[in-house]
Image (tube, rainbow, N blue to C red):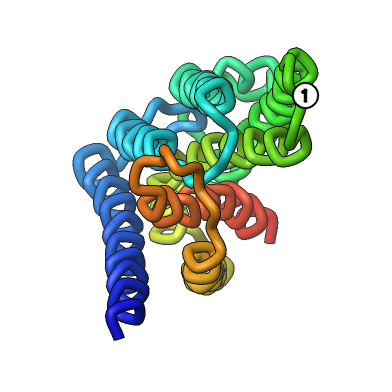
Amino acid sequence: MGSETRVDRPVKTMLAVQIGAYAVLVVLALIRIVLNPSMTAVQFEPLMTLGVLALGVTFLVCSPLRDGTAGRVIAGLIGAVALVLMALAPLGPVLFPHVKAGGSYGMRDMARYAPEAWFAGIGGLLVALIIVSFIRQMARAERSHLIRGLSHTVIDGIAMLAATGWCLLPQYLFGTLVSINRVAWIASIVVLVVFAVALAVASVWWLNEMDPDERANRPWIGIVVLPVMLAGTLVPMLSLIAALL
């Protein structure tokens, strides 16, 4: 009976915190839209950046993965670079010279431009993450559990990269409100919710199966935020698909 209580309580708490994290991100996006309803093709989102930063720091501090301090430093740096790219959007004018950074555009153009630039930037950073993680493993004097260490570092980094997709949430929700093709946008939100639920269910299994380092700091919290961070990829993905329909 005591064991069952210890299992049930973290699961319920985990799901409640997950829902709260999603709610905070949505509220931040809505506040952004209300305070400044104008949208541009390239735009710094300070509120969303703070939300993503909070997720990333929480995950790195409480990560259940066995990648060590070096692995988390790599993941943290790659996530920081991704946030800088989101803030400055330097890839936009290079990849899409026909669109001037900071200009105002139609909803369809803006909805395509932002996620396309995100995918291009994140794709490059993902390649860099894999290369750096591999070099780090090869540089170890003791290479025991090499595959596990490599995969855990990459997963940490992917979570950090994926979370930056939430920075596009204000544009995504704004597109739902003003787009001519509202059916596509609303359908994409339904898909986003379904995937979020699926990730929440998966996280319950992750919680039961996790084997964190004995020095890990409350690793169940890392399991809580991991699905929320991974769900960030769905925002630019579904935004782009809806804009193309």
Find the residue positioned furthest to the bottom: 1
Quarter where residue 10 is shown:
bottom left
Residue 94 on image: x %, y %: 69, 15
Residue 63 x %, y %: 46, 42
Which residue shows up at 35% across the image and 58% down it?
22
Amino acid type at mark 1: Phe
Is 142 on the left or on the right of 100, as rendered? right
Q: Residue at x 56, y 21 (%)?
A: 70
Residue in the image at 59% along x and 33% along y: 67
Residue 185 visible in the displayed image = no
Vertical placement of residue 20 versus 155, above or below: below
Q: Which quadrant holds the N terminus?
A: bottom left
**Residue 144: x percent and y percent?**
75, 31
Residue 220 lies, with reference to residue 100, above or below; the image says: below
What residue is shown at x 58% (from left), y 48% (from top)? 233
As drawn, is 39 to the left or to the right of 5? Answer: right
| Residue carrying label 1 | 134
* Residue situated in front as seen by the camera: 108 or 127: 127
Q: Secondary structure at mark 1?
A: helix
The picture quadrant where one finds residue 116 is top right
Q: In front: 123, or 225?
A: 225
Decide: few, some or many residues near mark 1? Use Cα within 10 Å; few <14, some 14-19, many ≥20: some
Locate residue 113 relative to residue 175 in the image: left or right.
right
Which quarter of the rendering shows the C terminus? Answer: bottom right
Question: Front-most of 187 and 3?
Answer: 3
Q: Determine whether 232 is above or below 54 in the image.
A: below
- Is residue 49 in view? yes
